[in-house]
Amino acid sequence: MATLRLAHSEQGAFILRLSSERGLQPGLYRQYFERLRNVIHFQNRALIVAAITRDELSTECDPDILIQAITGSVLVGTLMGFVPPPREAEAAARYCEHLVNQLLQGALPSHQPLPHAVSPDGRARA
């Protein structure tokens, strides 16, 4: 929900626009992008690492990839109009919960390995 609120805020709209025009204003982009990354990425990464430590998520879970999947889905969904705005609190919360559950659950049956699975360092997994 924090990503959704940020995407719908004035600051979030500014950051999204700035990111699409970063080649024109690289200094300005770096200044504001760091705020976005700090809020979304590093704070949420700590939550995922804690969940892995508590065995709520697999030790195979890559916190950075999971955050990017959730954040990217919310940001693109917001830009494309798929995500209910935060003012529709119940619908927005249901959407976010369903999105996260789907990502955590995965789309493949649990007995089926991921095709061409690659480790975080880029090497193919056995």
Image: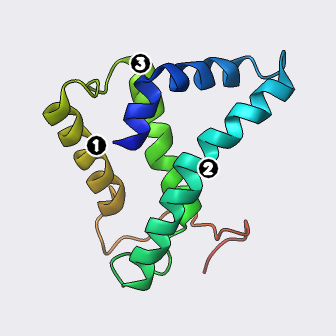
Kind of residue at disc 1: Cys
**Which numbered disc, 2 or 3, marks the residue that appears first in the sequence?**
2
**Mark 2–mark 3 distance (CA, rounded to whole Å):** 24 Å
Of pointers 1 and 2, the one earlier in the residue sequence: 2
Label 2, residues with CA under 10 Å away: few <14, some 14-19, many ≥20: few
Image position of 110 (left or right of 65)? left
Report whether residue 65 is seen: yes
Is residue 58 visible in the rendered structure shown here? Answer: no
Q: CA distance from mark 3 to mark 1?
A: 15 Å
Which numbered disc covers residue 80?
Answer: 3
User: Dividing the image into 4 quarters, which one contains the N terminus?
Assistant: top left
The residue at 48%/43% (across/down) is 71
Q: Which mark is residue 25?
A: none
Q: Secondary structure at mark 2?
A: helix
Furthest-left residue in this view:
90
Q: How many marks?
A: 3
At a point 69% along the width and 32% down the height, the residue shown is: 32
At a point 26% along the width and 25% down the height, the residue shown is 84
Viewer-nearest residue: 108 or 20: 20
Q: Circle 3 sits in a helix, a strand or a loop, which is it?
A: helix
Q: Nearer the viewer, residue 79 or 37?
A: 37
Q: Which mark is residue 38?
A: 2
Residue wearing tag 1: 96
